Amino acid sequence: MPIKNRVSELHAEITAWRRDIHEHPETMYDTVRTSALVADKLREFGCDEVVEGIGRTGVVGIIKGRMDTRGHVVGLRADMDALPILEATGLPYASKVAGKMHACGHDGHTAMLLGAAKYLAETRNFDGTVAVVFQPAEEGGAGGEAMVKDGLIERFGIKEIYGMHNMPGLPLGTFSIKPGAFYAATDNFTVDVVGKGSHAARPHAGVDTTVVASHIVLALQTIASRNADPLQSLVVSVTSFRTSSDAYNVIPEHVELRGTVRTFDKAIRALAEERFKAIVTATATAFGATANIDYQRGYPSMVNAETETGFAAEVAQRISGKPVVNAPAIMGGEDFAYMLEACPGAYIQIGNGDTADVHHPLYNFNDEAIPHGTSYWAELVETRMPAG
Ligand code: NI
């Protein structure tokens, strides 16, 4: 079965919501207007329950089917936050907030899930309960973790949960998915290398942190090349190198290094952290300097459950009418990882067609993807929990 007829009828309305959200981007947990818009719509659709304030500005809508013989609850999740980017699309509905922009398509994700909520509340053609989950702060704020910590899964009895993200470059009307580890664990570090400042003409009087930090940067490359199993994925990137002096003739007392470590496997993640700390500390010591390390574990690796991935792919293929693409793993992070750690489920990518990439000032969510995404959500529920 392709696009659902009722969803086609809703296409213009869902597009209008999407563009309204696009005009009013909000970042991190400050999704006040968006959360209120979502909650108002869910109440208007006749959801059985609408709960605000889960994970600060997260919203959950509960929709009960015509029957509930199995006591099953399926969660469907969308993200609502925008990015701190100055929009350059020149669209008539471009961002009205300078420096903020829906450059990752979360406006589209929110609108598509609202469309599905409207359809499901109207038709109730399933046996069980649906929880539509709208989260803030996907872009680096761990809003998904905040919702899980606020009891999202237990409170609503969610047994399995599904997520969706648009993918520029993937043809419109096409889906892609991958079982197992899909997105990377994202850990960040800051290192303060402390030496002894001196006149640059008298290096023997100081401990030169630029030299020490340079050795550290090079030595860190051996974690991926010499410590990790070459068949495992690991990235160690130093992205910032700042000395405490701008002068030509001063040896700086401090150098601050920043960067990120990306992994899929839990053991490799632990190995990378252990080797990182050992290399930084020992290299600094070898040159007579010290290093203060702030190593922050971020999002865990996002792992799609096998069974639910197969099921999601089957539903997507029915909606799309085309084979579902085998997605490659991605070294980027995804906050949905916390929800998938709390219960089984699957995250799927939906084609955005030939558009600018996400996080680019010219990016725009493709409204033509809406019928596919909303139909996927509706079909997923009706297939997983068929009525009578
Ligand atoms: Ni995103």
Image: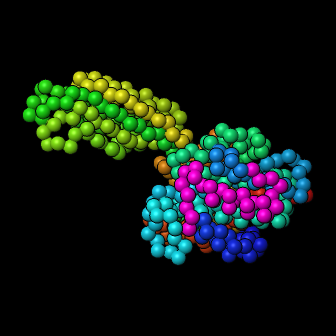
Considering depth in this image, is 115 or 8 the residue closer to the camera? 115
Q: Residue drawn at (12%, 30%), measured in percent from left and top?
A: 203
Residues drawn in magenta: 23-51
- Quarter of the image where the N terminus is located: bottom right
Q: Quick check: 344 left or right of 96? A: right
Q: Position of residue 46 (x, y in %)?
A: 82, 61
Asked if residue 110 lies in the magenta stretch, the reply is no
Q: Position of residue 321 (x, y in %)?
A: 67, 69
Q: Where is residue 245 in the image (x, y as percent from the top left)?
A: 22, 40
**In the displayed image of the protein, which residue is found farthest to the left?**
201
Asked if residue 38 lies in the magenta stretch, the reply is yes
Q: Quick check: 206 left or right of 29? A: left
Considering depth in this image, is 246 or 107 the residue closer to the camera? 246
**Any part of residue 240 in sight:** yes
Q: Where is residue 32 in the image (x, y as percent from the top left)?
A: 62, 55
- Quarter of the image where the C terminus is located: bottom right
